[in-house]
Amino acid sequence: EVQLVESGGGLVQPGRSLRLSCAASGFTFDDYAMHWVRQAPGKGLEWVSSLSWNSGYIDYADSVKGRFTISRDNAKNSLYLQMNSLRAEDTALYYCAKGHGSQHSGYMDVWGKGTTVTVSS
Amino acid sequence: SYVLTQPPSVSVAPGKTARITCGGNNIGSKSVHWYQQKPGQAPVLVIYYDSDRPSGIPERFSGSNSGNTATLTISRVEAGDEADYYCQVWDGTSDHLFGGGTKLTVL
């Protein structure tokens, strides 16, 4: 069974950092692009970042560019999101999602249950 | 930047057909994907590449895309279809973009 399990969320003060992880299982992790998508409380889905199977392509939403860093460790079947200089508007449920192919484009065919990040003093 | 516009809500009686639209400039030239999100759950892909269904998604779910509007159609709506629905495109300029979401209410 394909499974994605996010971790690392929590309560953090504005300006501080947090690192999210996503553990993948049930598929050949290094064959697929991966994504982070977030959802603020009561709001819609917002794409955050994507990277291709070999990290050759990486991109970010303008709202997080320069503050967040996406990465993957194919040997550990894991995806990461390093979040620096956090702001109140970064408060959201963060989903890890599997891309349908090796490149960053297209759709997300499997989603984790998400990890909650709350930025507040 | 590219914008996807969805109606905030759609209501339909059980057994009827629900149509949820996703508007965008010349969206017919892009591939549109649809996700279903029930309360407290993660999104689930229900339609990809405009009209393809993943395995396990009922045939009652279908999609189309032409001109400036993509449409998710749910036939013979059931109470269990009540959820938020999001359209999504990959745009070479804006990368992944989601519509604002449509809340489907089954009356």
Image: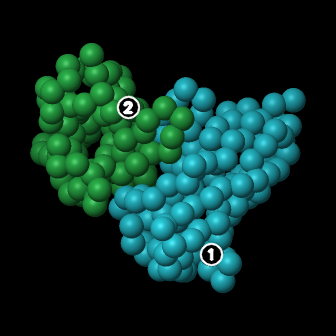
Q: Examine the image and state in which quarter residue A90 appears.
A: top right
- Name which residue lies at 65% across and 70% down: A78
Quarter holding residue A73: bottom right
Chain colored cyan: A
Q: Amino acid at mark 2?
A: Ala
The reply to whether discs 2 and 1 touch (Cβ–Cβ < 8 Å) is no
Read off the chain for label 1: A
Which quadrant: the C terminus of chain B?
Answer: top left
Q: Residue at x 69, y 36 (%)?
A: A91
For badge 1, the amino acid type reads: Asn
**As drawn, which residue projects farthest toward the top?**
B107
Residue at mark 2 to residue at mark 1: CA–CA distance: 31 Å
Q: Residues within 10 Å of mark 2 (few under 14, many from 20)?
A: many
Residue sitting at the far bottom: A75
Q: Quadrant of residue B67?
A: top left
Chain rendered green: B
Residue beneath label 1, please? Answer: A77
